[in-house]
Image (cartoon, rainbow, N blue to C red):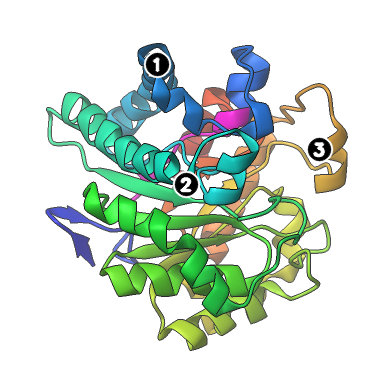
Amino acid sequence: MTSGSFALPSSDGTVFLSDDGLETTLVFHEGVDLPCFAAFPLMRSEEGRSLLERYFEPYLHTARQRGAGFILDTPTWRANRDWGAKLGVSAQDVAEINRESARWAHSLRKRMSGDGAQILVNGVVGPRGDGYRPDAQMSAAEAQAYHAPEVEAFREAGADLVSAITMNYAEEAIGIARAAKAQGLPVAVSFTVETDGRLATGETLRSAIEGTDRETGDAPVYYMINCAHPSHFDGALADGEPWMQRIRGLRANASAKSHAELDEATELDPGDPQDLARRYRDLRQRLNLSVFGGCCGTDHRHIVAICDACLT
C-alpha cells in the first residue's frame, strides 16, 4: 500500500526504523519535565520543537545510513481531550497541536530527506486513559467518536498514516481504526501486553488482532507490539497461524520488568541492548517484521544494536 508517494510497511521486505522511548528518554536522559508524561506541550514553543528535532535526528541519520525507511512519529501520544484537560489545554488547542505536530514532522522530513530517504509522517494516537491500565474503557463506537478529532486533525495536516499506540483493550483499537478508515487514512494498531502475553483485560493477543480485523474489515495496514519486553509475549506467539503474519512492527521495552514495576520506578532500567537486539532477530525469523523501534527505556544504542542484529 502507498500513502502519497511513499510506500507503507508491507510484506515486500522493505525495512523501516522508528525512534525509541521518546518520553522516557526526555525525562531520564534529558532531564525534561513532562507532566502527565505528555510530550505534546513541547510543540507550543520554539525551544520545545528544537528539542524534539535534536531527539529525532540521530535516528533519522541511522535509517539513512542503513538504507531503511523511517516512521516519524508525532509527539502526540497524550494529545487527546482528557489528557489535555489534565494539563489545562482546551480540546480546540489539542486539535491544533495535533495539526501542528504533523506539519512540524513534514518540515523535519523535508530537511532530512534530501537524498530521497523514505520518511513517513505518522500521527500518533494514544489511549484515552492510562497506557498500563484499561481505565476509561469505551465501546468501539464511543472510541471512534472520541478519537475522531485527533484522526481528522492528522488528515487535515497531511499525515501519511496514523497509529494507535499502546492499546490495552481491543474496543479502543477498533474505534481508532474505524475513525481512520472513515477519514481515508491508513492506520496501524499497536497492542501492549502484560508479562503473561495477554492484554491488561486478559484478552489474548490473537483475539485482539483477529477481533480488530473482523470489526473493521481488515482496516489496519499492519499491527505492532509495543511497551512490553519480548520475554513477555514470546510464549503467546504460535508459529504458522495467520494472525501472526499481521504483526509487522515491534517497539519493545528495554526492561523485562512488569508495567506495575515500571510505573513505580524512579530510575530508568535500560536492560541489555545486545540481548534485546538478539531477541528482535529471533522474532524477525518468526514474524513478518518490517518496522523496528523501541519503547520505554530504550535509546539510540538499542536501535543501533537492533539494526546490527536484524539488518545485516
Q: In this view, does 76 lie to the left or right of 219?
A: right
**Quadrant including the C terminus:** top left
Left or right relative to 95: residue 84: right
Q: Which residue is drawn at 40% across and 45% down?
A: 92
Front tag of 1 and 2:
2
Residue that numbered label 2 is attached to: 91
Residue 259 pos. (x, y %):
80, 46
Q: Is the magenta stretch mostly helix, strand or loop?
A: loop
Q: What element carries label 2?
A: helix
Identify the mark at residue 54; answer none if there is no mark: 1
Q: Quadrant of residue 78?
A: top right
Residue name at image x 37 percent, y 15 percent: 50
The reply to whether residue 298 is visible in this rendering is: no
Q: Please, what secondary structure does the residue beneath circle 1 have?
A: helix
Q: Give the residues drawn in magenta, as a range.
A: 14-23
Q: What residue type is labelled 3?
A: Leu
Q: Which amino acid does label 2 sit on?
A: Ala
Residue sitting at 61 percent across and 33 percent down?
87
